[in-house]
């Protein structure tokens, strides 16, 4: 497997995206979920060609992206997608909000499972609903799982939807098909909707069984709506394209109720880049996954050697690591201490859920091994 090599930090500092403009030049920025790898050449070529032909108008709709994803999903994810059951939009977050607005009433409860991607809290409130926390069971040492009994109780108490993170950010969990099928049965029993964020699905490591939610059972297809994109796997979040997918008449009704403008919010460059990624980006993605595999294991070695008190479980998916830094004594938000004393930027742990994030931080390891090693050395020196 030919690995894709992350770009050196001097070259990266010429980028103008959030990751490279949020901190001074003496800080190693590892909180924001952008990768340091060069853009996949098929995507770059497609964008260059679009510019050459001045193809910068409105996107022409969902069909091209949906058909490209159909082939990608079948080949890589074991997911048979019907392009007629896809509506595109600008990004996964927007898709989640718009689906929640269709399947809930203002004030309804929506289940999320901390530690969880911090914008989920805001997306739920943006949809005029309220957050119902059902934290993940387990932890770094024994591994995590969904609290199915807690989710069942939340639905019994009146929650009307759940935002599922599959695979899970920040812990890198890939729930197995049996657990997802059990979740779908709970949803069917309470007649609620599971909105499944599948954006990290292509970033599951080889050998790990990944089940898109809509594939696990008839109940999942009936009560699920999936939202995904090329954005994370191919490092193109700024190009703005995502897919909302359904697999039942009930789900189709949710998409049919979406406002007309939802689809028009996908950008032309996002559409072009997504088609290129899904059709021709596989070899690049394989190379990135190999490099991420190296780095997730390297991180374990570095921590064992330099910060043995820090607890970390090697993730099965994504390119982020959930670190328990409690033993260092850096307080509830160790990321603040790390930024001040080590010049390493990590994602604020309590933002992923105050009840489970204290003493934790998230680290992005989609970088060069040298940057990763330097970050851990800086943290160790700051003790």
Image: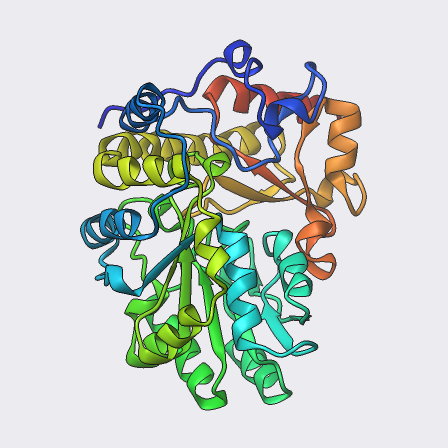
Quick one: quadrant of the C terminus?
Answer: top right
**Is the residue 371 above or below the residue 331 in the image?**
above
At x 78%, y 24%, the residue is 341
- Left or right, 129 with respect to 194, comes to right
Residue drawn at 63 percent across, 32 percent down: 307
Q: How many marks?
A: 0
In the rendered image, residue 145, in percent from the top left (x then y), is placed at 49, 66
Q: Position of residue 360 (x, y in %)?
A: 68, 46
Coloring applied to the structure: rainbow
Q: Position of residue 80 (x, y in %)?
A: 21, 62
Kindly tell me whether residue 141 is visible in this rendering: no
Is residue 133 shown to the viewer in this render? yes
Residue 86: percent from left, percent from top: 33, 60
Q: Residue at x 62, y 61 (%)?
A: 114
Residue 364 lies left or right of residue 248; in this view the side is right
Q: Nearer the viewer, residue 364 or 236?
A: 236
Name the image quarter holding the N terminus: top left
Q: Measured along the vertical axis of the image, is residue 178 above or below residue 20?
A: below
Res 269 → quadrant? top left
Q: Residue at x 47, y 66 (%)?
A: 258
From what the image shows, is residue 277 above or below residue 159? above
Left or right: residue 188 versus residue 343 is left
Question: In this picture, is 255 found above or below 302?
Answer: below
């Amino acid at each position: 497997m030919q690995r894709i090599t992350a770009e050196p930090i001097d070259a990266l500092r010429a980028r103008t995206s959030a990751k490279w403009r949020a901190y001074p030049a003496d800080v190693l920025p590892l909180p924001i979920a952008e990768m340091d790898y060069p853009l996949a050449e098929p995507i770059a070529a497609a964008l260059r060609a679009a510019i050459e032909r001045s193809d910068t108008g409105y996107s022409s709709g969902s069909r091209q992206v949906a058909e490209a994803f159909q082939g990608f999903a079948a080949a890589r994810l074991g997911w048979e997608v019907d392009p007629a059951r896809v509506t595109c939009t600008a990004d996964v977050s927007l898709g989640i909000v718009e689906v929640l607005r269709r399947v809930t009433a203002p004030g309804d409860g929506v289940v999320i499972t901390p530690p969880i991607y911090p914008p989920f809290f805001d997306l739920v409130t943006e949809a005029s609903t309220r957050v119902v926390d059902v934290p993940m069971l387990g932890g770094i040492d024994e591994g995590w799982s969904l609290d199915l009994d807690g989710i069942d109780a939340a639905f019994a108490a009146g929650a009307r939807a759940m935002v599922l993170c599959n695979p899970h950010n920040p812990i890198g969990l890939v729930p197995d098909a049996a657990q997802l099928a059990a979740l779908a049965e709970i949803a069917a029993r309470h007649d609620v909707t599971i909105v499944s964020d599948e954006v990290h699905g292509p970033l599951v490591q080889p050998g790990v069984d990944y089940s898109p939610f809509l594939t696990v059972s008839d109940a999942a297809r009936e009560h699920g709506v999936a939202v995904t994109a090329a954005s994370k796997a191919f490092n193109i979040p700024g190009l703005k394209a995502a897919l909302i997918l359904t697999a039942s008449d009930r789900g189709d009704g949710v998409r049919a109720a979406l406002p007309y403008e939802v689809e028009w919010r996908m950008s032309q460059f996002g559409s072009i880049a997504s088609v290129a990624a899904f059709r021709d980006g596989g070899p690049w993605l394989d190379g990135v996954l190999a490099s991420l595999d190296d780095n997730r294991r390297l991180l374990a070695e570095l921590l064992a050697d330099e910060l043995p008190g820090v607890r970390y479980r090697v993730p099965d998916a994504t390119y982020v690591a959930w670190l328990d830094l409690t033993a260092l004594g850096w307080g509830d938000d160790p990321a603040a201490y790390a930024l001040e004393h080590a010049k390493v930027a990590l994602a604020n742990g309590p933002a992923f859920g105050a009840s489970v994030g204290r003493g934790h931080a998230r680290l992005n390891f989609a970088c060069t091994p040298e940057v990763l090693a330097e970050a851990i050395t800086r943290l160790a020196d700051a003790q």
